[in-house]
Image (cartoon, rainbow, N blue to C red):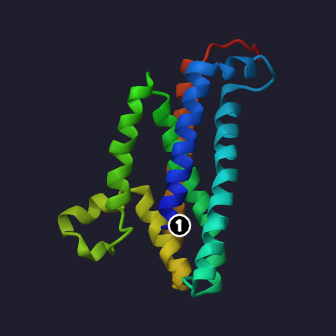
Amino acid sequence: MLATSAMNGVVFDMVFMLFFKLRYNKIYESVLNTPLGVRDIAIGESAWALVRSTIYATSFLIIATIAGFVHSWWALLAVPVAVLIGFACGSLAMAGTTWMRTHQDFDYLNLVLMPLFLLSATFYPLSTYPPSVQWLVQLSPLYHGVTLERDLMLGYIHPGLFVHAAVLALVGLLGLAIASRRLEKLLPLVAIR
C-alpha cells in the first residue's frame, strides 16, 4: 500500500498542479523570463513532487511501524524507494499532462491508474496471475515499486531488488525527458539564452 500511495499522491499532485499552471495560471511564461529554462521547470516540478512524496512515505512508514506491520530494519529504505516510485510515476504523469487539453481529460487519468492499482501485484503475488498476463503486470512501474517495498518491509533482501530500482529510475528519466521535450514545444520561448 505504501507503493500505491506514493504513486497516487505524486501523480495527482503532479497532474493537477502542472495542468493548472500550464493552461490557466500561465506561471511558466513568467518563469521563462528569468535565467531558468524549460528543463529547469520540469526538474523543479518533479523535485517538489518528490519532497511531498517523501513526507507521505515517511508518515505512512511511521503509521505502519506503530501498527506492527514493519518486520525489519530494512524497512527504513522504504522511504527512498517510495521517492523513487514517485519519481517514476510522477515524471510519466508530467509527460501525460502535457497532452491534456481540458479538465475533462482528467477522466483518462483514472483510466490509467485503476488498472495499475489493481494489476500490479499490489494485492496478490505475481504467481496468481495467468502466465499470459504476468508479462503485462511486469511492465508496470508500480509492480517494480510494490515488489521493492514488500521485500524491504519483510526484510527479504536479494540482488533482484537492484533490477527493480533500476527499472524505476529508467522510467523516471524517460518520463522526465519526454515531459521536458513536450514542455519545450508548449511553452513560448521568451527567454533568450
Residue 32 pos. (x, y %): 73, 20
Q: Exactly how many numbered labels are in the figure?
A: 1
For mark 1, does the 10 Å Cα neighbourhood hold few (<14), some (14 to 19), or many (20 or more) residues? many
Could one spot residue 129 in this view of the protein?
Answer: yes
Q: Is residue 78 above or below residue 91?
A: below
Position of 88 with respect to 116 (left or right) is right
Q: Disc 1 residue type?
A: Leu
> Which residue is drawn at the image coordinates 50% and 79% (left, top)?
151
Q: Residue furthest right?
A: 35
Q: Please tell me whether residue 72 is drawn above or below residue 100 in the rendered image.
A: below
Nearest the eye: 161 or 32: 32
Quarter location, residue 124: bottom left
Seen at 71% across and 12% down, the residue is: 190
Does residue 47 sit above or below 165 in this rendering?
A: above
Quarter of the figure that contains the C terminus: top right
Q: Is residue 157 visible?
A: no
In percent of width and height, residue 174 lies at 51, 44
Q: Position of residue 17 (x, y in %)?
A: 59, 35
Which residue is pictured at 56% across the width and 46% down the height? 173
Give SS at disc 1. Answer: helix
User: What residue did someone put label 1 on?
Assistant: 2
Percent x, y of residue 165 = 54, 64
